[in-house]
Amino acid sequence: MHYSRLFMCLVILVTSSQVIANKHNPFKKEIVVTAGHDIAWQFGEHTATRSVQGVDGTWYHLFYDGLRLRLRLTGSAEDSQYAARQFEDFAVYDVKIDGKRLNAFQWCLSNQDGHHRFLQQGLSVKKAICQNKGEQGAFVMRLTKDILAALNSGHVIEYELKPVRAKVRVKFSIDDFNTVISELSRQNAARRAAGSPEPVPLAVAPAAVAAAPASAPAPEKKPETRPKCKLDPPKGFPEINSIEYECDNLVNMINAQAAIDLKVEQIYQRRNKSAVETQEERKRLESARNRKQAEAARRAKEALKKEQEALAASAEVQEELSTDIAKKMISVCGKKWAAGEHRCYCEKYIEFAPAKIKANPECK
């Protein structure tokens, strides 16, 4: 009985350890982020955004403007390109509404250059229906009838992503999407009303109007003038002009948005390239300056070494010359000293004189 209880305790302990290990293993963990009804839609000028923050501090923004559906990851609550997180291997595995994969997303997978397992950053999709912009922290889908119908009838849209090591599932409630459609429709109607031309008042006819000849052609009908709407580029792109289109022409509106998006992407890439080139040029100049400084230091060191060697050689020569002169002078003075004489030019060498020869204080 004692052994049975001990065995059961060991089984429970091992099982609990495995459960705890799996629970806290960061490599197996999947992040789930949910934005429900408690998070309101934020409306801009013909746009709607629902945002939620994940446990890792990342913000997820679902953006809709009647032309596209965009998911963007940022480091702050601001849904902007400047706040966007930047990735190198951003992957999009699935987009579902109410648990069912969107047909448009499946089409994107099947029409991606390279492979069809997931949407990979850097690979293009035919017609750009799906755009993986991981370097801008965004995934964009252009609206199709399939997507629009699913949004109108669905309850939850779910994205399965892998921005870094862990997979992320982001879920947004969309069963109140009718409020988005209503608000954008209201804005669109107001825009049309603002863009409609004022009716031109009819001039008062004269009292007598001459009848037109029977053969005169009927007056030409002027083409009906349709109200125009204007699509502006996003802030921070002053070099892009606004595009006008007929307010009630959805195709023209989509084409205008696509043209602006293309220009924004081209300018963004050009700015990034320019920034990289500027950084590389700065590094190149810094490297060249360091090389020049190192070369100058090397030359100065070699010049100093040669100067020291020259000074040492000169001192050695001077020492040798002094020694030879001293030997000769001692020899000359020795003859005077042997004769019992002392000369002032021998005073410098008096230490070599015989004891009987004394120094002369008067010699300077």
Image: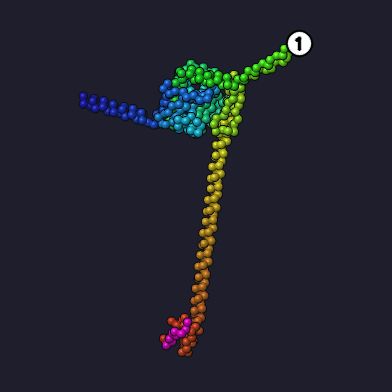
Q: Is residue 194 visible?
A: yes
From the viewer's perspective, tell me whether residue 173 is left or right of residue 130: left
Q: Is residue 119 visible?
A: no
Q: Which residue is rendered at x = 24% and y = 27% of the image?
A: 6
Q: Which residue is rendered at x = 42% and y = 28% of the image?
A: 53
Task: Write down the quadrant of residue 238 in the picture.
Answer: top right
Which amino acid, mark 1?
A: Ala
From the viewer's perspective, tell me whether residue 239 is left or right of residue 64: right
Judge by depth and name the residue closer to the eye, 304 or 33: 33
Residue 246 placement (x, y as % from top left): 61, 21
Q: Quadrant of the N terminus?
A: top left
Among all residues in the image, which is located at the extreme top?
A: 214
- Give the magenta-colored segment's residue range: 356-364
Task: Write down the quadrant of residue 58 in the picture.
Answer: top left
Q: Which residue is rendered at x = 52% and y = 25% of the image?
A: 45
Among all residues in the image, which is located at the extreme bottom?
A: 339
Residue 232 placement (x, y as % from top left): 57, 28
Residue to which mark 1 is pinned: 211
Helix, strand or loop at mark 1: loop
Main secondary structure found in the magenta portion: loop
Q: Which residue is rendered at x = 48% and y = 29% of the image?
A: 79
Q: Residues within 10 Å of mark 1 (few under 14, many from 20)?
A: few
| Magenta stretch encompasses residue 298 | no
